[in-house]
Amino acid sequence: MAHILLVEDDSDIMRINQSFLEKEGYNVHCADSVQQAAFLLEECTPDLVLLDVMLPDGDGMDFCGILRQKTQAPVIFLTARDENDDVIKGFRSGGDDYITKPYDLNVLKARIEAQLRRNARPEAQHPRIELPDLTIDLFSGTAELDGNACSLPQRELQILYLLASRIGSRISYHEIYEKIYGCDVEDSKNTIRVNISRLKKHLAMDDMSTYEIASTADGEYVLRRVIF
Amino acid sequence: MAHILLVEDDSDIMRINQSFLEKEGYNVHCADSVQQAAFLLEECTPDLVLLDVMLPDGDGMDFCGILRQKTQAPVIFLTARDENDDVIKGFRSGGDDYITKPYDLNVLKARIEAQLRRNARPEAQHPRIELPDLTIDLFSGTAELDGNACSLPQRELQILYLLASRIGSRISYHEIYEKIYGCDVEDSKNTIRVNISRLKKHLAMDDMSTYEIASTADGEYVLRRVIF
DNA sequence: AAACAGGATTACGATTTTGTAATCGCGGAG
DNA sequence: CTCCGCGATTACAAAATCGTAATCCTGTTT
């Protein structure tokens, strides 16, 4: 399933690697020059790159730096040069592994798997606020109060997010408006009021809910947990 | 500016504290019983509570537990009892500070200020992705590419967020759809395609942009940084 | 009681959002 | 060159969003 970009100018090695990797179920794209590799990088957007160091039209390590700007895919160098300095230079240039020829194909496979495994970055965790019986998810634009989830329009979600991020503290109309619209304005009051009213309705927030939005005399709101 | 709820049954102490705190610029709300304190807690939503331990109709420490459910406001106990056990019990019940009578008013002020300062929680930092020349802010629903910001509709923002959170890696139509809609469906292709098209237009993403959204043959998308 | 004040809710309509469907554009096959 | 396939874009219409304004409600003052 994963796509591998194989950059290698020796056609024999290329063929052996390609057939092995394809047998292992990988989607292999081959390049025998820096130029072709750069082209394929755009085309196939590989999940991993196997990179020979010495290529007819350039140095694999130099290419690695350029490649890194475009993709996070791990790079494994494949080369006959096993001097410590070369290895170090390989890692310095952005490589993730360094394999010296000759190598065992199953070792190659293991190293590829290791890189792909590690590269499987954890899911981008959704930014959310979680309180007992109330969660707010900015990515999906939803909130869940006392077990029933609903999606909220942007304005209501923003207000709820602000209130929840300061649960138990007061926030003025003006501050809410300012945070949402970037600047304050003459009658921010009404706009915020209406949207809070809508928010309550959407959340089915009533006397039975575990949270309430209270308003104070001087134009401030508070989200409070209600215990009784 | 800050609102302080002062709970104290000795009317002399009450008066002294109240006038001092008001002179210092605080908004003081007074209660001489647990019952009245509970009422004012709803009404004035204080930023800080000064709580006498022995009240005619109950124990301040017990009340503190209830209060904590409704507000994050710091609680400072004011009491004549200075036994270690009492102090410990005070903190156990949720108090933030414990002052024994008699006390200096300026010390009281300093302790109040310290509590309010610490309680000034840092701004809820907006959840955002920041890449060079590209930032995405889920709270405000905006994105900025190469210096020009624009607000994006939810669907486009979600797609951009997903792509950016995995910049350089491929994501299939199906995965994007699944992440946004919760379930996959027969022709997720078109919906995602259209929204990506709209996204590009909104971001004014063209050949000159530092990022591009590339699509591969087998129904996958990648967000890539373009270097020239 | 009537008038009033001010917050909460509802009404309304311009605008935006968004899935679906139609159209365009382009590279490859015949 | 024409036709096809397929992805990108555009068109369209239903639905949702949202600020403004009108109305409702409730406690207070006259």
Image (tube, coloured by chain):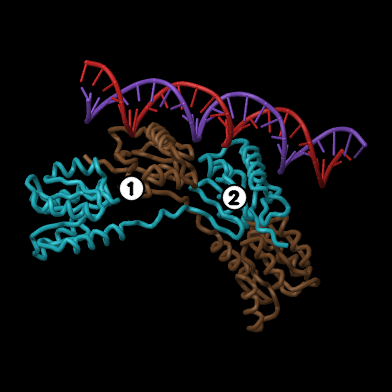
Chain colours: A cyan, B brown, C purple, D red
> From what the image shows, is residue A74 above or below residue A178?
below
Q: Report the label total.
A: 2
Q: Which of A96 and B64 is in front in this view?
A: A96
Q: Which residue bears the numbered disc 1?
A: B167
Q: Where is residue B37 in the image (x, y as percent from the top left)?
A: 74, 63
Dot 2 falls on a residue whose secondary structure is strand
Say which chain tag 2 marks. A
Give the residue type at disc 1: Ile
Give the residue type at disc 2: Ala
Q: Which residue bears the numbered disc 2?
A: A149
Q: Which of D28 and A76 is in front in this view?
A: A76
Which residue is located at x 71 percent, y 59 percent? B41
Q: Nearer the viewer, residue B144 or B13?
A: B144
In this picture, residue A129 sits left or right of residue B166: right
Which residue is located at x 39 percent, y 40 percent? B144
Which residue is located at x 16 percent, y 48 percent? A63
Say which chain tag 1 marks. B
Q: Which of A27 and A223 is in front in this view?
A: A27
Q: Which image quarter holds the C terminus of chain B?
A: top left
Dot 1 falls on a residue whose secondary structure is loop
In this picture, residue A208 sits left or right of residue A119: right
Q: Position of residue B15 (x, y in %)?
A: 75, 65
In this view, the mark in front (1 or 2) = 2
